[in-house]
Amino acid sequence: GCTVDYVAGRNRYMGYLISLGIYSFKRVKVGLDCANGASWNIAKSVFDALGADTYVINNKPNGTNINNNAGSTHIEGLQKFVVEKGLDVGFAYDGDAIILQQSVFGQKGMEPGKEWTNMNFRKEKACDGK
């Protein structure tokens, strides 16, 4: 077999995802865990286009490492990454990029498991004056 990178299709899909963005990520430091899967080569570009300062882990698939101690099925790696880098928010994909799990642990040391909506997150950033 062989792998074909269908660039036009990928770019069209990325444009579609960007068009769905209803919140700005300007001045937001975002951590992404791509689970060494399908999101590895588009997730960062999408978040960058939405204004985020994006940091990525587990974005080097080799054909056998998909979801291997990574992504939404192993959120602890992203939690540690977000805290160590002082990021504002982290998003973890599963291997086929169907599930996107949000976790907020950033600079303020918010406890694991605390759920925030995007709107609450944006309000908090606005109140910080940053």
Image (spheres, rainbow, N blue to C red):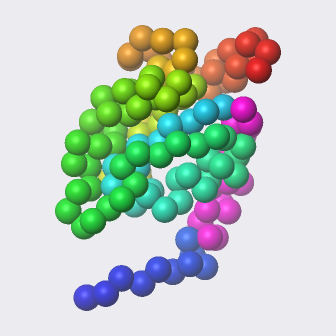
Residue 108 seen in render: yes
Report x, y in % for residue 22.
Answer: 72, 40
Residue drawn at x 61%, y 33% as measured from the top left: 29
Residue projecting furthest to the front? 84
Q: Quadrant of the N terminus?
A: bottom left
Q: Quadrant of the C terminus?
A: top right
Q: Which residue occupies the foreground of this view, 114 or 20?
A: 114
Residue drawn at x 49%, y 29% as measured from the top left: 85
Report x, y in % for residue 18.
Answer: 67, 54
Residue projecting furthest to the right? 129
Residue drawn at x 38%, y 16% as measured from the top left: 112
Query: Would residue 55 be found to the left or right of residue 97 on screen?
Result: right
Q: Which residues are magenta?
A: 11-27
Residue drawn at x 33%, y 55% as measured from the top left: 36
**Residue 20 lies in the magenta stretch:** yes
Report x, y in % for residue 35.
Answer: 34, 49
**Residue 89 lies in the magenta stretch:** no
Query: Would residue 35 be found to the left or right of residue 127 on screen?
Result: left
| Snapshot quadrant of residue 12 | bottom right
Report x, y in % for residue 78.
Answer: 38, 33
When the figure is inspected, residue 56 is found, relative to residue 126, above or below; the finding is: below
Numbered circles on residues, count: 0
Query: Would residue 10 be found to the left or right of residue 4 on screen?
Result: right
When the figure is inspected, residue 129 is found, relative to residue 85, above or below; the finding is: above
Residue 20 seen in render: no
| Snapshot quadrant of residue 51 | top right
